[in-house]
Image (cartoon, rainbow, N blue to C red):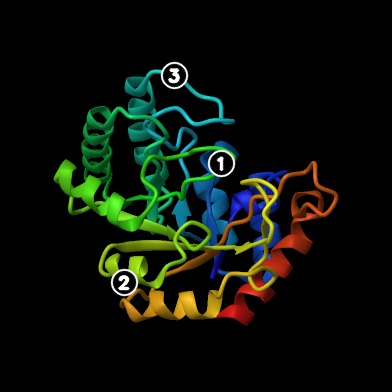
């Protein structure tokens, strides 16, 4: 059981380590933009395990709302450099997105290079499918079949999938991912959802999380589950406005209940 650092967005890397350790979880999903210069040492001293790492430039094509270069070539270079840097933390995997757009050829070549960077650094890499949204588009890979077809086109069977039940909540798609799941992010969906940054803690929304996690376990997956919350601070009930320690404790308790 772990927590992705997006869940406590306003806390520093050091504050996240302390909060997660105090909350009683064993893992931390590291966001590279938070990582301290001596992050590897701090991680070892904390006793926490690095789960699913998010590169500072997480996608091959530019993302809305996130800073970074516009040129895919620069983004791929940055992604590969991040894979090498994050590999030093010995995570379960390093995840990445395609980004939105129509340049499939560039994305296929990018996947091959990210896969090669992972192999060279001895770390697994995983593509995350992201559902199509009425608010913002973050990927042209919106389902497990889309992701598997893209990885087959790239000829990269070593690249896995990062499943986020916020985006993949159909049992049929989860079954299709059997043997390729490198990590699982868990959050719940508010109804109605006010925007793409309006997640709630597991068990506080409308997703059938116990059933979905049971299906994931049924595929043979026996790895980590990280709570990952995005929470728009313009809403008065945003989880991002709360102290990191409180959010971490509530994240652990809520994930324990649904597991």
Q: Label 2 near label 3: C-beta < 8 Å?
A: no
- Report crowding for label 3: few under 14, some 14 to 19, many 20 or more residues within 10 A (C-alpha): few
Quadrant, the C terminus? bottom right
Quadrant, the N terminus? bottom right
- Report crowding for label 2: few under 14, some 14 to 19, many 20 or more residues within 10 A (C-alpha): some
At horizontal 25% and vertical 53% (from top left) the residue drawn is 148
For marks 2 and 1 on the same chain, the one whose residue lies earlier in the sequence: 1
Q: Which residue is mark 2?
A: 175
Q: Which residue is mark 3?
A: 70
161 vs 67: above or below: below
Q: Nearer the viewer, residue 87 or 234?
A: 234
**Secondary structure of residue under mark 1:** loop
Tag in front: 1 or 3: 3
Q: Nearer the viewer, residue 181 or 28?
A: 181
Would residue 44 be found to the left or right of residue 86 on screen?
right
In the rendering, at what x and y percent does residue 8 appear?
69, 51
């Amino acid at each position: 059981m772990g927590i992705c650092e997006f869940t406590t967005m306003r806390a520093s890397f050091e504050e996240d380590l302390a909060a997660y350790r105090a909350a009683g979880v064993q893992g931390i999903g590291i966001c590279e933009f938070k990582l301290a210069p001596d992050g590897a040492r701090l991680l070892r001293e904390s006793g926490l395990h690095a789960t699913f790492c998010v590169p500072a430039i997480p996608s091959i094509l530019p993302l809305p709302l996130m800073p970074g270069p516009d040129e895919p070539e620069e983004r791929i270079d940055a992604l590969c450099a991040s894979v090498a840097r994050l590999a030093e933390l010995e995570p379960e995997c390093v995840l990445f997105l395609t980004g939105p757009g129509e340049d499939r050829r560039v994305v296929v070549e990018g996947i091959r290079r990210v896969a090669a960077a992972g192999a060279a650094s001895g770390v697994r890499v995983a593509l995350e499918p992201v559902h199509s949204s009425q608010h913002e588009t973050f990927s042209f890979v919106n389902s497990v079949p889309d992701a598997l077809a893209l990885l087959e086109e790239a000829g990269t069977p070593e690249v896995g999938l990062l499943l986020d039940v916020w985006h993949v909540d159909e049992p049929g798609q989860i079954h299709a991912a059997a043997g390729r799941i490198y990590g699982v992010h868990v959050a719940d969906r508010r109804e109605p959802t006010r925007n793409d940054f309006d997640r709630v803690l597991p068990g506080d929304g409308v997703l059938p999380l116990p059933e979905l996690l049971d299906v994931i376990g049924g595929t043979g997956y026996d790895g980590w589950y990280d709570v990952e919350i995005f929470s728009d601070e313009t809403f008065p009930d945003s989880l991002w406005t709360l102290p990191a320690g409180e959010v971490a404790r509530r994240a652990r308790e809520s994930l324990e209940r649904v597991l």
